[in-house]
Amino acid sequence: MTHFLEQLSISGFLPRFVTGMAVNYEIAGLALVMGLTIGLPLAQASLAGGWTRLLSGSLVSLMRAAPTFVVMFVLMNSIPRHATVLGVPVAPSGFIAVAISLAPYSASYVFDNSVEALKNLRRGSMVSALLFLPNMMRAFFVLVMASSAGAAIGVTEAVAVILRETQQLPALHDKLLLFGIGVVCFGVPMQSAFALVRLLHRRLNRIALSNQNGWAATTIKAAVAQ
């Protein structure tokens, strides 16, 4: 164990891993912003009805069917590295390619939750509409985990750092221990966030149910008084 820790210290694993985790969070944040930018207008168009509902539904169906790895590799290989438009480079970096590849999932998730939130707002249920916020928190952390796909195209995120470090460790048990550390570092924040989301969901659902019961009681009293 002592030798294992010394090896990690000498190689500078911890600062590189922390930097890699920051990259995972940055990719997830950018993907969620893209999802909100695309998903919210599509949700509003869907609720407008008519041809806009059909169009938005078709676009969301296409996004749901878009495989993350396929989108990522197409972006990285279909545009020449030195391609420019009016002198401006247009080839995406690995970081951007991963974020864009996650955007279809993000946008479709935002779409589904936005439609429900907007329906609740139209019904006058502000508390139920606020469930949109913890759902976005959940989406963010799912995107953090999914951003590890960037290791496949050379993005220096946390999983890539772990994989490179394991190549420097001679013993199998040290490699397994390092993978275990990675699982804990990813898993603890994720599970803590999901627990918080579940807590917020239960809290908001109780408030919404209480408001509905109060509204029903008031309606009954008014009807009896008449």
Image: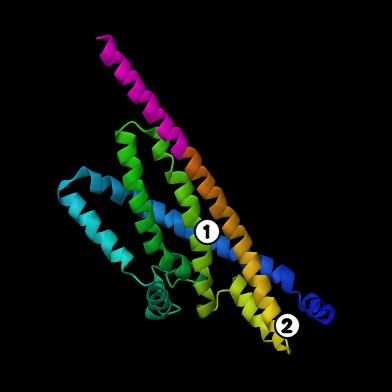
- Whether residue 30 is in magenta: the answer is no
Give the farthest residue toward the bottom. 170
Along the line of sight, which residue is nearer the eye, 213 or 36?
213
Which image quadrant is residue 47 in?
A: top left
Q: Amino acid at mark 1?
A: Phe
The count of marks equals 2
Where 169 sits versus 223, above or below? below
Where 53 sits versus 147, above or below? above
In the image, taking residue 87 as reference, residue 152 lies left or right, namely right
Residue marked by disc 2: 174
Q: Residue at x 70, y 78 (%)?
A: 177
Which of discs 2 and 1 lies nearer the camera? The answer is 2
| Comes first in the chain, label 2 or label 1 | 1
Q: Residue at x 20, y 56 (%)?
A: 55
Q: Residue at x 30, y 40 (%)?
A: 119
- Whether residue 218 is in magenta: the answer is yes
Give the farthest residue toward the front. 224
Q: Tell whether label 1 touches label 2 (CB within 8 Å).
A: no
- Which residues are drawn in magenta? 205-226
Residue marked by disc 1: 141
Where 155 sits versus 27, above or below? below
Q: Quadrant of the C terminus?
A: top left
In the image, taking residue 161 as reference, residue 206 lies left or right, namely left
Percent coordinates x, y for residue 98 in the rendering: 47, 69
Disc 2 secondary structure class: helix
Characterize the local packing of mark 1: few (<14), some (14-19) or many (20 or more) Cα atoms within 10 angstroms: many
Q: Magenta part mainly helix, strand or loop?
A: helix
Q: Amino acid at mark 2?
A: Asp
Percent coordinates x, y for residue 80 in the rendering: 41, 80
In the image, taking residue 220 as reference, residue 137 lies left or right, namely right
- Gap in Å between the C-alphas at discs 2 and 1? 28 Å
Q: Which mark is residue 84?
A: none
